[in-house]
Every structure is written in structure tokens, then in C-alpha cells.
Image (tube, rainbow, N blue to C red):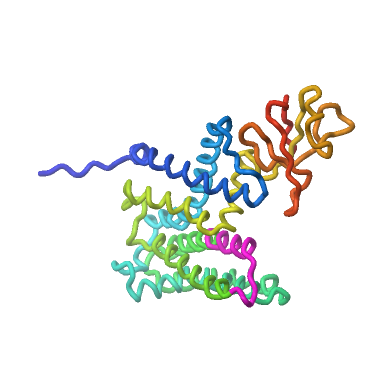
Amino acid sequence: MTDAPKKISVIEKIKTILPVAIAAATVTGFGYLFLYTTKHGIPFPLALSSLPSLLIATMAVAVVLGAIILCLMLLPAIAKSAASTSDYSNLFDKERFSKSNIKTYLETTGWCILLPVILLYMHAMFPQANIVTYFLWPSFLYALLSSIHYVWKISKDKKKETAAVVLWINILSCVWIFSIVSIILKSIPHGISNWWFWLGYPAGLSILLIINYILIIPRFDIWENINRNSFIALFILSILFPLLISPIGEFLTDKSMYMLRLGGGYKSVFYLENNSADNMPKIIIDDKIKNSTKQVYVFLNIGDTKYVSLTDEKNKEIYGIKSKSIITEIIMQ
């Protein structure tokens, strides 16, 4: 009798992919930082003195972004892991992409996602109509109740457990799809002449629904089937996706820089060495407190120069403060 294949632990999987993840995160991080500095009008920091901190920062930004996107993408799969205690898996056929499975998916989850997201799209087309205000949440509630009613009707055993799992999957599926859709609608300008928006939005939504289908279909267990190569591919895809769509990349990089206090417009006050204020722009120096800046928004806190502004508006003036002139920094909440 042959021994059963030994299962690789999560820690061992992480050890095997760590070198590739670090390399991918470092390279991709430079892309994110370039997007970020271009957006805010900051010269890209390539001085040799800032290279070590720059490498660490770019890797950290990419890892944070990858973690956020992976968590969002895997939310439905995390919810589906509770299906082992219910009759959820019996709702679907053994085949992954059968007509019956697609119909069941649309009835249990797809409808719940499509209805409110289509309303978001209509709101983008007719912003004066207040469609979202009056119809979004009622439609979402109706879709949830409709899907639960359908599950209750077709379930043979454990109706309550199955309905609870479907409800949880629907909520988490909507969270990650809504997150991506909301960023797109907020970050990317659109109009009647932007055909990519009118044609690309439905195509993009279809892709998201297909990904969601794969994540929650019971016959595809992401935790059991994932291996080193597929995890590396998924991680690289997660950190590359926002970079390829620059408005999303800029938005997420802003948030990551803010979380890491590497920039992102967090508020701060710098206390300076004696007489160093004389060599800085007078507009950022506080006249009331000696050797102190006014409260500024920090947009880049890497290397030998801190790039700040007095406002966080789009059309802002950026000023540089040399790190060697700073005694201490007080971060404001």
C-alpha cells in the first residue's frame, strides 16, 4: 500500500513563494510609486541616499495592496468554507460550468449582485435621477430575500443552514464587487463620448461575475486545489491589476501610503533645527512657533526629502523639507 501524499502546510507554502512575492512586490511597487508621484507632481525620488528606504517602501506598498485585493477577492470563498456544515453543495451539479449550475448561481447569487450594480450603472448615466437614493437599497434587500426564498424552496435538507450560507456569500460577494465598481465610478471620468465606459463597464462586470462564480462554486475548493504556482500567479495578478488600471492604482496607492504613514496626505507638524527654517519656503513656516512648520499634509515621507503641502486639494503646491533639518515630527489625528 502506498502512502498518501503529504499535505503541505500553509507555512511551508508561504516559505516557498516568499522570494518570488518579494521580487514581484518590489518591482511592482516602483510602478505604484511612479503613479503616485506623477499624480501629485512630486519628483520621483531616485537619489542613492534614499534607495534603501525606497526599496522597502515600494515593497510595503505593493504587499499592502496585494493583501487588500486578495482579501477582497477571496471574501466569497471564505464565506463558502462554511458550506461544509450545510446542504449548500447539493444545490449544484458535479460539473463546474453546466447550464444547471449557471442557472442556480444566477438565482442564488448573481441576481443579488446584478440588480443593485445595474442601478449604479444607471445612476452614472442619469446622475440627476437619484436612482441610487430611492432604489438601490430596496432592490438589494429584495434581491437578498428573493435569493433566500429560492434557496429555501429548492433545498432538501438543512434549509436554515443553507439559506444562512447563501446569505453570507451574497453579502461578501457584493462587498468586493461593489468595492471595485465604486472605485471605478469614483475615479474614472465618464460621459456619452467615453465608449470604453459604456461598453467596458458591462464587460468588466461580467468578468467579475465569472470570478465570483469560480470562487463560490462548491466543486472548486480554492483552499484544497491551490498550489505554489497558482498562488504566485494569483498574488502577481492581485498587485498588477490596479497598476494596469491607473485610476484604481492611484486610489489604492493613496490609501496604502496613508496607512503606512509614507504619504497619502496625512497631517503633520515638523519641528526644525535652529536656523534651518531660513532655507525653506516661508509659506510653510509657522510665525507663532519658532522653528516649526504649520500643519501640513505629507504626500511623500521617503528618503532625504519630505514632500508636503498646505492643502490636500487636487491643484496644490508641493514643498520639500530636508530630512536632516527635522528634529521631530508630530502626526496630527
Q: Is residue 137 magenta?
A: no
State whether the magenta stretch is mostly helix, strand or loop.
helix
Q: Position of residue 63 (x, y in %)?
A: 50, 43
- Residue 96 versus residue 243: which sits nearer the camera? 243
Q: Residue furthest left?
A: 1
Give above or below for 103 relative to 260. Answer: below
- Is 23 left, or right, of 170 in this rendering? left
Give above or below for 284 relative to 289. Answer: below
Residue at 64%, 44% in the rendered image: 43
Q: Position of residue 328 (x, y in %)?
A: 72, 26
Residue at 77%, 47% in the rendered image: 311
Give above or below for 270 relative to 192. Answer: above
- Is 172 left, or right, of 311 in this rendering? left
Q: Is residue 190 magenta?
A: yes
The answer, for residue 152, to whether it is visible in the render is no
* Residue range corresponding to the magenta coloring: 176-194
Q: Position of residue 41 (x, y in %)?
A: 67, 49
- Is 196 left, or right, of 219 in this rendering? right
- Residue 142 versus residue 135: which sits nearer the camera? 135
Q: Which of the image's four quarters has the N terminus?
A: top left
Residue at 72%, 30% in the rendered image: 329
Tally the marks: 0
- Is 168 left, or right, of 230 in this rendering? right
Res. 23 image quadrant:
top left
The answer, for residue 51, to whether it is visible in the render is yes
Q: Which of the image's four quarters has the C terminus?
A: top right
Residue at 38%, 42% in the rendered image: 20
- Residue 144 versus residue 38: which sits nearer the camera? 38
